[in-house]
Image: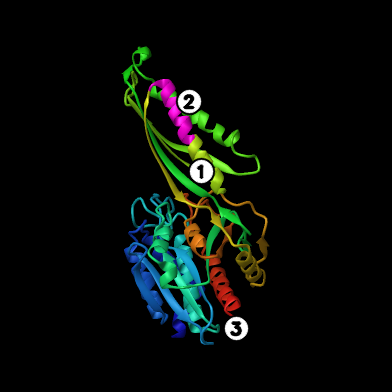
Amino acid sequence: MDDSLLPTPERLAAWRHDFHRHPETAFEEHRTGARIAELLRQAGLEVVTGLGGGTGVVAILDGRRGPGRAIGLRADIDALDVEEANRFAHASQVPGKMHACGHDGHTTMLLGAAFALAADPDFAGRVYFIFQPAEESEGGGRVMVVEGLFERFPMEAVYGLHNWPGLAVGEAAVHDGAVMAAFDVFTLRLSGRGCHAAMPHLGSDTILAACQLASQLQGLISRETPPHQSAVLSITQFHAGDAFNVIPETVELRGTLRCFDGELRAYLERRFRQAVEALAGFHDLRVELDYQSRYPATINAPEHAARCAGVLEALPGITRVHRDLPPSMASEDFAFMLEACPGAYIWLGNGVESAALHNPHYDFNDAIAPLGVAYWQALVKTLLDD
């Protein structure tokens, strides 16, 4: 490989800024996927495109020490439907879309690792670089697994990472088990008899019923979830009515329910349905409930987590590896890959001053890109050392 292609901090920043300026959301990452494939070919890697619904990419690199084990490294590549509030030169050029979660940085770090390892493949075995679309709520990880990712590219373990605002640059976090929560979504429509606001006895008060339900459902968390387990139920949308003097016929509520334990997840869904039906019966309302189980919990295999922690602790530039941070109630579709193949998912500090994930002021910290590249390199050479 030409030395001019090595992943210098300046080159990493340039790649990342390009991705940031051109965000693409779930299963629409055509430009992003094409650019990833173009760069990987420049590095001399074997590249497979058209995966994960069409926009995913996998690159293959064999070590110069000969045959051995195979592992996978994964980055998510999609953006969010968020209007960017930043005004710097690399701000989004696509109205209503931005890289508000740092997937542009994740993509860049994995590309950098591919270039660095291709320049010095001093390991035995094979590495698969997995660039996955549609992480944000649409389950691109599940699609890749269902399409046969692990059958087509056999590997003994798969690894992922996420930048983490609030965690200092140079710090990382590794969990021995649960990292991120499972997440379900619901859309609930309550329908009754609309009426004049001055004559509520002539109709069915959908607003009153919906407000009562919003409060009542919180009892599933505060009174039915064991205190030593975590769960959160959030109603995030409430749509009803168009006039001051009309009690509307329909109210629509939307939201999410999240937890870590599979049995608790099933129990809370069952009790959610029961609560909705009971309240609707009391208020003489019709119910339409669309309850969808989206992502499972992201659970690290302890032995793989320990390997990642060991690599991080020996890595220049890493000042602290947290092993006791609580897991996040946010969710991650890398969970589907970890259900199909053992591995681990770590957090890499994005800086204590960083805006929160999914915030219109968020930006991935270019200073951590070389550290992410070095982590991927060290992980490969440690795990595939014959």
Taking depth in this image into account, of 18 and 103 the one nearest to the observer is 103
323 to 122, vertically: above or below: above
**Quadrant that contains the C terminus:** bottom right
List x then y, in percent, for residue 138: 39, 53
* Label 2 neighbour load within 10 Å: few <14, some 14-19, many 20+: few
* Residue depicted at x 42% and y 26%: 280
Q: Residues within 10 Å of mark 1 (few under 14, many from 20)?
A: few
Name the amino acid type tagged 2: Gln
Camera-near label (2 vs 3) is 3
Q: CA distance from mark 2 to mark 3?
A: 63 Å
Residue sitting at 48 percent across and 30 percent down?
275
Residue 34 coordinates in the image, percent (x, y): 34, 69
Examine the image and state in which quarter residue 204 appears.
top left
Q: Earlier in the sequence, mark 2 or mark 1?
A: 2
Of callouts 1 and 3, the N-terminal one: 1
- Which residue is label 1 attached to? 266
Whole-Å distance between the Cαs marked 1 and 3? 44 Å
Q: Is residue 277 left or right of residue 377?
A: left
Residue 14 appearing in the image: no
Which residue is found at the position 32% from the left and 23% from the top? 243
Q: Which residue is mark 3?
A: 386
Q: Which residue is mark 2?
A: 212
Q: Residue at x 65, y 39 (%)?
A: 227
Which contiguous range is marked in magenta? 272-284
- Between 141 and 318, the one nearer to me in the picture: 141
Kindly state the secondary structure of the residue where label 3 is placed: loop
